Image (cartoon, rainbow, N blue to C red):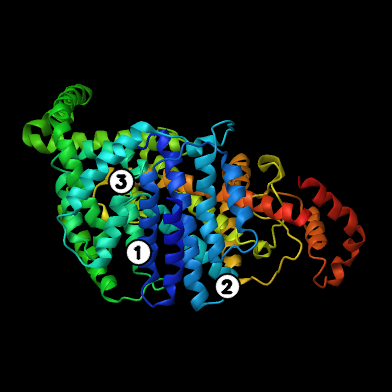
């Protein structure tokens, strides 16, 4: 779905937003908690996820679902109405989708496929909201490419930081 | 652009003193930063990614989390990128290439999105998220927007109503984020409407061609269904074609792609997604610099990473105190490695290399760990190895370039 050139711009976007999100998250956490390793890991992971989803600019369902999930999480957020609201809507959405899903399945092979798509739905954020297998696969595709880009960026950053740390250590 | 970004960074950092949700600020500032960058557009640079990151981190090395460094973080790489010439390339260069076609698409799409978004009237938070998600129309969005808009323009009956089910149904913060999706769809529809008359004909011909071939391929099943409920069968066929084509593109991404079975393909996809998520988790943990969190595995992957050791490096003063959170991930990692090792040794090695780890005999691992954890009181049964401390440590330091 994504032309190859876009992966580099996506990485750049992601890096920008992730750095910013890291700073903001860290400032927020400095107000609240001490920097234990688990806290920092959560901070990094959370900010990276949000940045990844934001870098996608809401073009995909999984990114919107990630943002929705994190905007209702307690770590960053102190408004109560939206979580309830979103949960209700999500449930209603699921019911509508199940009703409207007209699928012709035949045989035990289809049951196996169905079980696996259920597992995949749980993995991909926002996967449960999609009634269509085609759109689920499309979301998965997109999610996989962006995960790979994210991992690439994070790995480069880690490598560079290690290099800097080593250089500083040598001096 | 540079002063704008600095102000925004400073503003963003000053704000958390209030109790307003920093998440909102986060998105807001992301939006603003990106809005600032967007006007300047894509810096024509090709400083290699590693140099760029080195500059970020050298400026940040002194005080990584201070606001001054934060401003520098944002300022310096972009100053460098703006000033840099595309003199040298390396294989990591693809990071910063320019893309004029994508820029055009981005500007066009942004207009569509802004027009579509102006009709929504929501509360502030949703507007902020909406603006973030819409107005920062990078090439990524545009590049996807083009095929997606065409896709919306096709407007098959089975797909469109579901999308519209989604968007009004999910309100709230998710809805604030969904609104741009809707207006995105609307904007996409607008741009796709122009394209759709042109595209609908090939699509129709494609579907009829597909129908013809499908009916020839499976005459018994198709003929019955085709006569019974025509639009349903066509929709079904379209749906299956779409699924098949997406599975094909997924196959190229996911390793070990064998086209034989949908179930096995789904298995591969699931495993790969789990693996990627685990990798993200491990990478995010390892970057903290508190590498002692992963104390059990204290080795570099020197072969593939060239000694950079992206993940798990035994730094000198590593603290072994981080049991809880790391242990759960370590057991998960070990389970994953064990599972992979059952299937294929190569994939297990690959998996570990992806995390900057490698397999090594236990004796060597204990030797290295005692060498690096000299500061901590060593247990009596490991005191035997302390004799070889110096040699081991020299070897480890020698292997780091």
Rate crowding at label 2 as few (under 14), some (14 to 19) or many (20 or more) other CA atoms within 10 Å. Answer: few
What percent of the width, then of the height, locates residue B134? 28, 51
Q: Quadrant of the N terminus of chain A?
A: top left
Task: Indicate the chain on which mark 1 is placed.
Answer: A
What percent of the width, then of the height, locates residue B9? 45, 61
Residue A35: which disc?
Answer: 2
* Residue at disc 1, secondary structure: helix
What percent of the width, then of the height, locates residue B153? 17, 37
Residue B355 visible to an observer of this rendering: no
Task: List the residue tagged with mark 3.
Answer: A108
Decide which of B4, B201 is in the foreground and name it.
B4
Decide which of B78, A69 is in the foreground and name it.
B78
Residue A69: which disc?
Answer: 1
* Residue at disc 3, secondary structure: helix
Task: Indicate the chain on which mark 2 is placed.
Answer: A
In the image, taking residue B165 as reference, residue B77 lies left or right, namely right
Q: In front of the other: label 1 or label 3?
A: 1
Task: Indicate the chain on which mark 3 is placed.
Answer: A
Decide which of B225, A80 is in the foreground and name it.
A80
Residue located at (60% from left, 58% from top): B60
Residue B265 visible to an observer of this rendering: yes
Q: Quadrant of the C terminus of chain A?
A: bottom right
| Mark positioned earlier in the residue sequence (3 or 2) | 2
Q: Quadrant of residue B57?
A: bottom right
Are the residues under badges 1 and 3 in a single subunit?
A: yes
| Mark positioned earlier in the residue sequence (1 or 3) | 1
Contact between marks 3 and 2 (CB within 8 A): the answer is: no
């Amino acid at each position: 779905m994504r032309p190859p050139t876009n992966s580099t711009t996506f990485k750049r976007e992601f890096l920008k937003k992730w750095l910013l999100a890291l700073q903001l998250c860290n400032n927020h956490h400095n107000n609240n908690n001490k920097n234990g390793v688990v806290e920092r890991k959560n901070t990094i992971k959370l900010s990276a996820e949000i940045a990844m989803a934001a870098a996608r600019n809401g073009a995909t369902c999984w990114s919107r679902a990630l943002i929705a999930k994190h905007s209702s999480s307690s770590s960053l957020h102190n408004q109560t109405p939206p979580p309830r609201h979103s949960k209700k809507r999500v449930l209603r959405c699921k019911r509508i989708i199940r009703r409207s899903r007209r699928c012709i399945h035949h045989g035990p092979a289809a049951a196996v496929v169905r079980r696996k798509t259920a597992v995949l739905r749980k993995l991909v954020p926002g996967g449960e909201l999609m009634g269509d297998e085609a759109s689920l696969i499309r979301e998965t595709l997109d999610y996989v490419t962006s995960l790979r880009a994210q991992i690439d960026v994070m790995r480069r950053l880690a490598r560079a930081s290690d290099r800097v740390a080593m250089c500083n250590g040598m001096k | 652009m540079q002063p704008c970004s600095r102000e925004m960074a400073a503003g963003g950092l000053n704000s958390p003193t209030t109790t307003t949700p920093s998440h909102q600020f986060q998105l807001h500032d992301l939006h603003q930063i990106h809005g600032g960058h967007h006007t300047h557009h894509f810096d024509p640079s090709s400083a290699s990614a590693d140099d760029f990151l080195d500059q970020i981190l050298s400026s940040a090395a002194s005080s990584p989390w201070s606001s001054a460094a934060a401003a520098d973080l944002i300022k310096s790489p972009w100053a460098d990128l703006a000033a840099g010439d595309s003199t040298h390339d390396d294989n990591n260069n693809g990071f910063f290439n320019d893309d004029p076609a994508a820029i055009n698409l981005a500007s066009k799409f942004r207009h569509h999105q802004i027009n579509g978004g102006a009709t929504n009237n929501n509360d502030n938070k949703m507007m902020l998220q909406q603006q973030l998600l819409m107005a920062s129309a990078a090439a990524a969005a545009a590049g996807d927007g083009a095929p997606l808009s065409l896709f919306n323009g096709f407007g098959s009956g089975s797909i469109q109503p579901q999308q519209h089910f989604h968007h009004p149904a999910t309100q709230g913060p998710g809805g604030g984020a969904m609104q741009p999706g809707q207006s995105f769809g609307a904007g996409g529809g607008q741009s796709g409407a122009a394209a759709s008359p042109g595209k609908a004909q090939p699509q129709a011909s494609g579907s009829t061609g597909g129908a013809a071939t499908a009916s020839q391929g499976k005459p018994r099943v198709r003929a019955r269904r085709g006569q019974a409920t025509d639009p349903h069968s066509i929709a079904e066929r379209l749906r299956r074609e779409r699924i098949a084509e997406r599975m094909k593109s997924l196959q190229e991404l996911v390793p070990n792609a064998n086209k034989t079975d949908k179930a096995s393909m789904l298995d591969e996809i699931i495993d790969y997604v789990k693996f990627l998520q685990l990798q993200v988790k491990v990478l995010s943990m390892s970057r903290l610099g508190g590498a002692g969190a992963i104390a059990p595995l204290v080795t570099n992957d020197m072969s593939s990473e060239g000694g950079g050791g992206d993940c798990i490096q035994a730094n000198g003063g590593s603290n072994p105190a981080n049991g809880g959170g790391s242990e759960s991930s370590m057991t998960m990692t070990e389970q994953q490695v064990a599972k992979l090792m059952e299937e294929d040794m190569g994939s297990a090695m690959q998996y570990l290399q992806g995390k900057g780890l490698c397999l090594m005999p236990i004796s060597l691992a204990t030797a290295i760990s005692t060498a690096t954890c000299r500061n901590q009181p060593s247990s009596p049964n490991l005191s035997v190895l302390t004799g070889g401390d110096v040699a081991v440590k020299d070897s480890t330091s020698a292997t780091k370039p």
